[in-house]
């Protein structure tokens, strides 16, 4: 939790409590349903929570903003962002139901009210629109772009244009080329100068 407070100092008491509850809850649930690598669990705040909050330093989601988390797994980046933006509505989607069980249980235990979940493949979501799609290392950029495009609204409600915001790592040149997109790209290390983030990036493809 100290690593979060190193970079963010204006949380409400409720937000601070919710963030503090994440580690014991994930440790408990990870014993039952493995959603985080065993070697990563003790680094939950650096490897998962703060990493997810990279998006909060870039996009200021408003009360009216709607966000879909594609392939949320155990709840990242959706859960930390839902705590950070308590008035923004998040839909967390995953094709593996047991992962969503962990998400739902953690939301219930922490009192997160602005998350709903859906057990489905994102390609099967019809007749719904969102301002942003977010994702973290789930699929190639070309697939994320293809899946998210029909789900995105055109109207801009935040400080950045509606679109796909994803977190990825490593050499992304080929992946970006194959996506045929020109994403805005930011090095996470420039935002949070921790060694873990040296080859991790935020990418934003506008609608």
Image (spheres, rainbow, N blue to C red):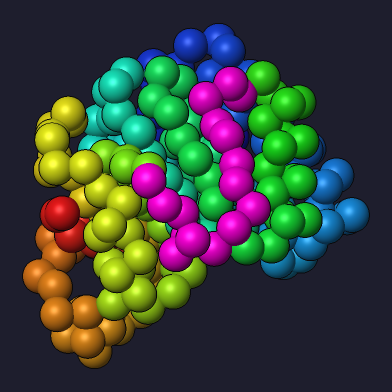
In the image, residue 119 lies in the stretch drawn in magenta: yes
Magenta-colored span: 112-127
In the image, residue 196 sits, relative to residue 4, either above or below, namely below
In this view of the protein, which residue sits in the foreground, 115 or 192?
115
Using the rendered image of the protein, determine whether residue 190 is visible from the camera's viewpoint: no
Q: Could you say where residue 159 lies in the image, as x and y percent from the top left? A: 13, 32
Q: Residue furthest right?
A: 32
Q: In which quarter of the image is the C terminus?
A: bottom left
Q: Could you say where residue 120 lies in the image, as x and y percent from the top left? A: 59, 58
The quarter holding residue 38 reads: bottom right
Q: Residue at x 14, y 73 (%)?
A: 181
Q: Give left or right: position of 11 versus 186.
A: right
In the image, residue 173 sits, relative to residue 77, either above or below, namely below
In the image, residue 19 sits, relative to residue 28, either above or below, namely above
Using the rendered image of the protein, determine whether residue 27 is visible from the camera's viewpoint: yes
Q: Could you say where residue 75 lies in the image, as x and y percent from the top left? A: 59, 47
In this view of the protein, which residue sits in the foreground, 120 or 164?
120
Q: Residue at x 71, y 37 (%)?
A: 104
Q: Give left or right: position of 109 versus 134.
A: right
Q: Could you say where residue 61 lies in the image, as x and y percent from the top left? A: 29, 30
Q: Residue at x 29, y 77 (%)?
A: 142
């Amino acid at each position: 939790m100290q690593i979060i407070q190193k970079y963010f100092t204006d949380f409400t008491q409720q937000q601070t409590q919710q963030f503090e509850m994440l580690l014991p809850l994930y440790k408990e649930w990870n014993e039952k349903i493995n959603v985080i690598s065993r070697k990563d669990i003790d680094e939950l705040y650096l490897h998962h929570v703060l990493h997810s909050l990279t998006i909060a330093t870039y996009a200021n989601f408003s009360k009216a903003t709607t966000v879909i988390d594609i392939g949320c797994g155990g709840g990242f980046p959706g859960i930390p962002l839902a705590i950070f933006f308590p008035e923004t509505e998040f839909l967390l989607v995953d094709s593996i139901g047991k992962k969503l069980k962990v998400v739902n249980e953690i939301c219930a235990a922490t009192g997160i009210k602005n998350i709903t979940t859906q057990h489905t493949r994102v390609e099967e979501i019809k007749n719904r629109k969102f301002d942003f799609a977010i994702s973290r290392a789930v699929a190639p950029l070309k697939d994320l772009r293809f899946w998210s495009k029909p789900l995105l609204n055109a109207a801009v409600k935040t400080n950045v244009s509606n679109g796909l915001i994803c977190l990825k790592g490593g050499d992304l040149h080929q992946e970006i080329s194959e996506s045929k997109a020109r994403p805005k790209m930011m090095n996470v290390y420039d935002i949070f100068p921790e060694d873990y983030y040296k080859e991790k990036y935020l990418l934003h493809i506008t609608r």
